[in-house]
Image (tube, rainbow, N blue to C red):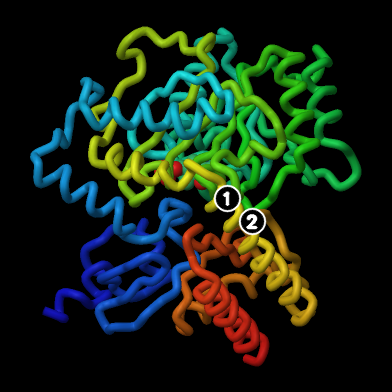
Amino acid sequence: MTKDHKMEVFENYESSVRSYSRSFPTVFQKAKDYKIWDTEGSEYIDFFAGAGALNYGHNNEQMKEKLIDYISEDGISHSLDMGSTARADFLNQFNDVILKPRGMDYRVMFPGPTGTNTVESALKVARKVTGRDQIIGFTNGFHGMTIGSLAVTGNAMKRKGAGIPLSHAVSMPYDQYLEAADSINYIDQFLQDSGSGVDLPAAVILETVQGEGGINPASAKWLKGIEKLCRKYGMLLIVDDVQAGCGRTGTFFSFEQAGIEPDVICLSKSISGYGLPMALTLIKPQYDQWTPGEHNGTFRGNNMAFITAMEALNFWKDDALSQDIQEKADIIESHLTRFAKSYPALEAQQRGRGFMQGLACGVPEYASKICEAAFENGLIMETSGPKDEVAKLLPPLIIDEEGLLEGLKIMETSIQQVLNK
Ligand SMILES: *Cc1c(COP(=O)(O)O)cnc(C)c1O
C-alpha cells in the first residue's frame, strides 16, 4: 500500500512539467478546513489554499453535504450549457446575493472551467465589440497559460513556453512600476500620440492585486485613472479577478473599494468554493454581443461546481466574513511588517492587502528558502514574483485566529532557521 504512495511514482511516470510536487515533496491524503495531512500522518497548515482556489478551506461541511445529496439523487452531472436545475439555481443565487445588492448589471457567461478560459473569452469579446485587435496588459501581470492569456502576461519564462511569437498585445507599466513617472500619464501619452507605435487597443486587462507577479496592489487612484483612460479611448476595462476575487481582498470583488466599474470581469479559482473547476465571465449587457455558440466548450457549466458554488455564496449574504477577513488581514500585515523590521538581513517589505499578502525579500533567494523551511516545519506556502522573491501568504479566508497565529509563528521560526544557516 505505502509502496504506491512514494514520491518516486511522480518522478517515474509524470511529465517534467510538474511543479508543486517538487516544492512540497510528500503525498497528501486528507484535508479539512485550513489543515492538510500526508500519508506519513504529518499535519500542515495551509497558507497556499490551492493558489486561491480554496478560499473557504478544504472540504467545507455544508458544501460537501449538498454535493453528496446532489450526486446520490442522480442530479445532472454533465450537460454542456443545456438548462439544468443546478445552473438555474446558481444563476438566481449569484444575481440575488452578489450582483443585485451591489447594483451591478452583468450577463453571466460560462466559458470553459478554468481561469485562462475566462480570460480568453474576455479578450475575444473585447476584440469583437470594438473591432480592434491590441490588448494592453501590464508589467508582472499573470492571466493564464493559453496563447491569448500568455500574450498579456509579463513573465518571460512562461511567455517563452508558448513557442510562438505572442502578438496583439502591448505591455504597459503597472502602478508603482516606474520610479520616476506616473504610469497613467505615460500610457495616456502613448495612446494620444499617432507616432507612438501603439495602436488603439480593444481593452485593458488588469489584476487589482497582482498574484503571481509578486503581490503588487494597485491603488484606488491608479485604478480610477485606468478606468478614465478606458472611457477616453473607447477601450473595455477587463478586471481579471480570478485570484483576487471571491473575497480574497476582503470584499467579494477586489475592485469594490476602488469604486470602478469594469466592462468585463473574470472569475474562477474560488467561485465553486470547493476546489471544483468553474469559471465565469461577467459582461456588461451592451457588450454581450456573442452569437450563440461563438465561444463554447464541453465543460461550460460544471453542475457539481454549481451546487457547491451556491452554498459558498451563502457566505456573502451578510458582511460577517468580510469583516472577519479585514480583522485578520490586519494581523497578517502587522506580523509581516514586524518580520521585515526584526530580520533586516532579508531586506524585506510587507506587500499586498486583505488575505493576499507577502514578504518581498530584497535578497530574492531568501523567499524560496523560507518556504522550504516552512514546509519542513508544517506550513504550506509558495513564492511569487519575477525572481520568486516574495514569500506569499494565501490562507483560507475561514481560518481561525489560532490557526493564523500558528502559521505565522511557523513562518517566523522558518525565517530564523534560514538566517542562522
Ligand atoms: C490562476 C490565474 C489565472 C489562470 O487560471 P487557470 O485556472 O490556471 O487557467 C488567470 N488569472 C489570474 C489572475 C490567476 O491568478
Callout 2 touching callout 1 (CB < 8 Å): yes
Q: Classify mark 2: residues with Cα within 10 Å, few (<14), some (14-19) or many (20+).
A: some
User: Which amino acid, by three-letter code, is at mark 2?
Assistant: Gln
Q: Position of residue 342 (x, y in %)?
A: 77, 81
- Compared to 45, does 417 lie above or below? below
Q: Which residue is mark 2?
A: 326
The kind of secondary structure element at disc 2 is: helix
Along the horizontal axis of the image, is 72 left or right of 385? left
The kind of secondary structure element at disc 1 is: helix
Residue at the far right in the pictured view: 180
Task: Classify residue 364 by image quadrant.
Answer: bottom right
Quadrant holding the N terminus: bottom left
Q: Which residue is mark 1?
A: 322
Does the image show residue 369?
no
Q: Nearer the viewer, residue 192 or 374?
A: 374
Inter-mark Cα distance, 2 to 1? 6 Å
